Amino acid sequence: MKKIVVLSIFGLLGVVSSCGGDKSTKVAEVTEATKTETTTENGNPSYDPKRGEGKFEDVEVDEKLNVAMADNGLKAFDVKCSSCHKLTDEKLVGPGWAGVTTRRHPDWIMNFITNPDPMIDKDPEAQAMLEICLVRMPNQSLTDDDARNLLEFMRKNDGVKP
């Protein structure tokens, strides 16, 4: 019996110690990779939709805000997103949304909203957010239209005018 307890303790210690690692190195690698990305004409970082996982490759956004879509996005935010995200830059469970449309390409945002698990598994930027937030974003089963409306609401939150 004592052998089983001792072996269990050593096994548990082995598992716990193997879960560690130098997180600063991983974050630094992701940050360095992000710095080398090129930017588009409007200043957003370029985005390769195949890098993560998703079907959105050419999400078109108008210069002006679509108010109806943004209003529908607010409804989706209130129901599905507000328990984990704030509209400021403050982290709640997940990161705050302020400035997200200036930091992320529309394709990336919509792919992450509709397909968070494969994005977290494959995309270095999503993995870096997971290291900061420590909680995986759950799949909210949002439709493509919901995701597009949320994107428009995020743009409104970031100051895009109608």
Image (spheres, helix red, strand yellow):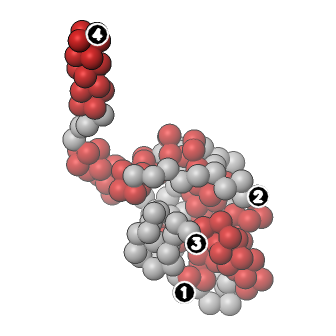
Q: Earlier in the sequence, mark 1 or mark 3?
A: 3
Q: Nearer the viewer, residue 142 or 8?
A: 8
Residue 159: image tag: 1
| The C terminus sits in image quarter | bottom right
Q: Earlier in the sequence, mark 2 or mark 3?
A: 3
The residue type indicated by label 4 comes to: Met
The residue type indicated by label 1 comes to: Gly
Viewer-side label of 1, 4:
4
Query: Which residue is at 71% across, 53% downward?
Result: 141
Label 1 vs label 4: CA separation? 65 Å
Residue highlighted by disc 4? 1
Q: Secondary structure at mark 3?
A: loop
Q: Residues within 10 Å of mark 2 (few under 14, many from 20)?
A: few
Q: Secondary structure at mark 4?
A: loop
Query: Which residue is at 54% across, 63% downward?
Result: 105
Q: Earlier in the sequence, mark 2 or mark 4?
A: 4
Q: Residues within 10 Å of mark 4 (few under 14, many from 20)?
A: few
Task: Locate residue 4, reporting x and y percent.
Answer: 29, 12
Residue highlighted by disc 3? 82
The residue type indicated by label 2 comes to: Thr
Q: Residues within 10 Å of mark 1 (few under 14, many from 20)?
A: few
Q: Earlier in the sequence, mark 3 or mark 4?
A: 4
Residue 56: image tag: none
Residue highlighted by disc 2? 143
Q: Secondary structure at mark 1?
A: loop
Q: Are marks 1 and 3 in contact (CB under 8 Å)?
A: no
| The N terminus sits in image quarter | top left
Task: Locate residue 63, reporting x and y percent.
Answer: 64, 81
The residue type indicated by label 3 comes to: Ser
